[in-house]
Amino acid sequence: MIRLAVRCRPELADRVLAELLELVPEGVEENKGGEWVEYAVYGPPGELPAVPDLKAAAGEGLIEISSTEIPDDWADSWRDFHEPVWIADRLLIRPSWKVEASHRPELEVVVDPGQAFGTGAHATTRMCLELMLGLADDGEATGSLADFGTGSGVLAIAAAKLGWDPVIACDSETAALEAASGNAAANDVELDLMRLNLREQSPPATETVVANLTTPLLTEVGARLPKVPPRALVCSGLLAAERDRVASAFAKRGFELDSHRSDGDWLALLLRSA
């Protein structure tokens, strides 16, 4: 098994990550040093991104690319990198093997990601959860919700616990749907699992949509929404410089920007059907 890592300059890390997720949509491992941020992927030779593609993705932010052979127990190493994450001091996202002792949260989501992307730690996920909490506070956590690109199911499970029902967890990867199913059972919630390729298939019609995707996928989602659009759409995975591109794609389908969150170069948008 090979660990392939890209180190980049910290000030360009968010942009490099956005480009890498185009190559590796299932996610990457993140590590930080004083003058670098490192993104790593694991896999057998021949199944990893090509070095020239990684160099192109990192662009001017590139420091170095390294390749390391790792022992057979590599699959357990991801456990070392996942810590509990608090959202608005109310919602706790944590792995099953770590218990938060400081104080009890209003709401808790226990997630073991395995090989699927999504632990709640990334800025895009946190901002989606903040916007979802806001919708719940306004009494809008009702009716159906679809989570596009559910990964390990963090957003879908939080939605179910906040009151949306039914919740449809969509992903193109079998490993992600398996992880989401296991995590849903661990949290005692029900998710409707749907294998869905958003580049080729139309998404289901629901009253609310959460889409934590890359900008190219978000724009494709905007073009593929059903005739009866959701009343609210939370989307993230875009950079600040991509805001107008994404907002324009959804404006063509009658959506208006209601509010947004920002964290570094990342944005999350709350859009409403006009």
Image (tube, rainbow, N blue to C red):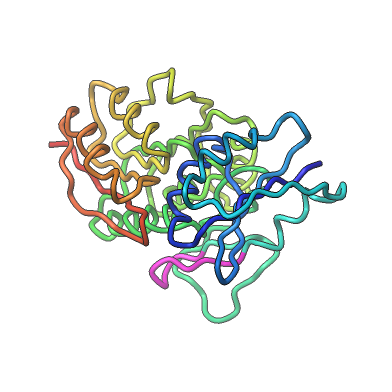
- Residue 261, quarter of picture: bottom left
Q: Residue at x 20, y 35 (%)?
A: 248
Q: Residue at x 51, y 28 (%)?
A: 194
Q: Residue at x 57, y 72 (%)?
A: 34
Is residue 85 shown left or right of residue 249? right
User: Is 161 above or below relative to 35?
Assistant: above
In which quadrant of the rendered image does the N terminus lie? Answer: top right
- Looking at this view, is 33 or 87 the one in front? 33
Where residue 187 sits in the image (x, y, percent)? 58, 53
Q: Residue at x 44, y 69 (%)?
A: 106
User: Is 222 above or below relative to 21?
Assistant: above
In which quadrant of the rendered image does the C terminus lie? Answer: top left
Where residue 39 sits in the image (x, y, percent)? 60, 52
Where residue 46 sits in the image (x, y, percent)? 74, 29
Where residue 67 sits in the image (x, y, percent)? 74, 46
Magenta range:
83-92
Residue lying at the far top of the rendered structure: 200
Q: Is residue 244 magenta?
A: no
Number of on-image labels: 0
Residue lying at the far right of the rendered structure: 72
Residue lying at the far left of the rendered structure: 274
- Looking at this view, is 207 or 2 the one in front? 2
Is residue 162 shown left or right of residue 186? left
Is residue 128 shown left or right of residue 177? left
